[in-house]
Amino acid sequence: MTHDRPSLRFLGATDTVTGSRYLLESGGRRVLVDCGLFQGYKRSRERNRTPFPVPPHSIDAVVLTHAHLDHTGYVPALVRDGFKGPVYATDGTTELCKLILPDSGYLQEEEAKYATHRGSASHSPALPLYTAADAVRSLNSFKVREFDDPLDLGGGMELTFVPAGHILGAAQVHVRFGSQSLHFTGDLGRSDDPFMYPPRPLGEVDVLVTESTYGNRKHAEADPEEQLGEIVRRVAKRGGVVLFAAFAVGRAETLMLYLSRLRRKNAIPDIPIYLNSPMAIDASDMYQRHPEEHRLRPEEYRGMYTVATFTRSVDDSKLLNLRGGPMIIISASGMLTGGRVLHHLAAYGTDPKNAVVLSGYQAGGTRGAALAAGERNVRVYGEDLTIRAEVIQMENLSAHADTDGLIAWMKAAPRAPRIAYVTHGEPDAADALRLRIKRELGWRARVPEYLERVDLGNPR
């Protein structure tokens, strides 16, 4: 059942930093802003397996802020289960989803096969949430929209994508309904990001839905390039392997940019660097096709992609585990939730001469978060590993605005919104940002509940 009065329902990202899903209802139309996977804690992941809160066939359109799986990863399941409408996204987001979604389906199939083989699943055979074929079929629903090109969604709603920085194609989503406006930050980039341009400042809005990934933290002031140089020199001197756990889209590119600069200055030894992420390799062409979205000069871009040897095949990936140090491996996933990096972690994480570098935010409940918190016993593919390698978390590599960045971005607004809903953060982070918004900006702010519906004509 749809509602005639404009309303917003929080179907995800309310008590967690993942599972971004917001349902807009107006004039008998339903629009889903983001359609992400829940990740991290088992309690959150189990939401991926429960029936979607509204029938997928009742949704008229999906709008995506950017390509990361916590914002897009449920699209294949939604389409498979009956959604027939368009999926609107920017060109960059659409191109990246062509890589990310089939890869997600493939990894889920592989994990299901492995769980069945090991007998570690609660069902036999273990079933993936969706398959690579489901993901490929869902791509037929994508419709590209340009930044700053208003789109009539029906039901009195008009959508506009606004640049958000963060990663290629990332957008803020501005929705007008009548004389009112609703604005979603998506994931907001940094003003000082070495790769991407800063997000566009906040304009005049009535209701704001903001992320709070770093709502209670500031990025370290240490220069990430200098810190990377120190890590590589230290580990190479002892003949070790530096294993970077990096998001294939965004973080891997930033790491290669810094490493190419360090290599050019002879600030790190001439040891082999491997980019072991087919997705990150494929994404390189996409950044080249969208120079208007990033800061890099062509020569810097070329240097970035010649500093590393690209590892595509599974056999070549396995050979890296036999090679030994000194060397650098950049591999996904960034929170150690799956992918090739886990095999490298098993191969090199148990030796104290090596180092595991967590290159950004680690969602609660992930292996990356456990290591960042000091835990050294992790389970990988059904086996317990004791991590003796040096573990370093480099949050200053994050592509998210930190708490000061978020507040500074909001201060640009010409007037206060009627309310700011603080989402997409762990409970402590979301509440800390809520308090800052209230005390420093004097705005009404609230952390919504999971599945809560609010009346946009009278938001509370």
Image: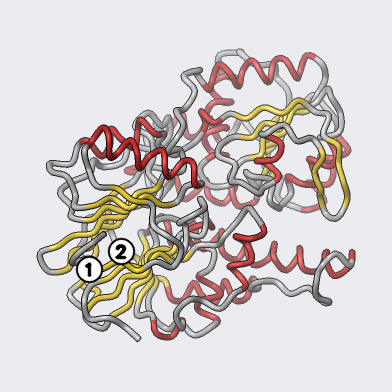
CA gap, disc 1 to disc 2?
A: 8 Å
Measured from the top left, where is residue 320 in percent x and y?
Answer: 81, 39
Mark 1 closeness class: few <14, some 14–19, many ≥20 residues within 10 Å = some
Q: Which residue is mark 2?
A: 145
- Viewer-proximal residue, 18 or 330? 18
Q: Would you say the residues marked 1 and 2 are in contact, meaning their CB atoms lie under 8 Å apart?
A: yes
Query: Which amino acid, by three-letter code, is at mark 1?
Result: Leu
The picture quadrant where one finds residue 109 is bottom right
Measured from the top left, where is residue 330 in percent x and y?
Answer: 67, 37
The residue positioned 46% from the left and 83% from the top of the image is: 55
Query: Which amino acid, by three-letter code, is at mark 2?
Result: Arg
Q: Is residue 233 left or right of residue 208?
A: right
Q: Secondary structure at mark 1?
A: strand
Measured from the top left, where is residue 78 in percent x and y?
Answer: 51, 76
The residue positioned 46% from the left and 63% from the top of the image is: 450
The residue positioned 48% from the left and 76% from the top of the image is: 53
- Viewer-proximal residue, 254 or 278? 254
Q: First in sequence: mark 1 or mark 2?
A: 2
Q: Is residue 448 above or below residue 434?
A: below
Q: Quadrant of the C terminus?
A: bottom left
Mark linked to residue 151? 1
Q: Is residue 121 above or below residue 155?
A: above
Q: Residue furthest left?
A: 179
- Viewer-proximal residue, 112 or 228? 112
Work out whether residue 144 can be spotted.
Answer: yes
Work out whether residue 170 can be spotted.
Answer: no
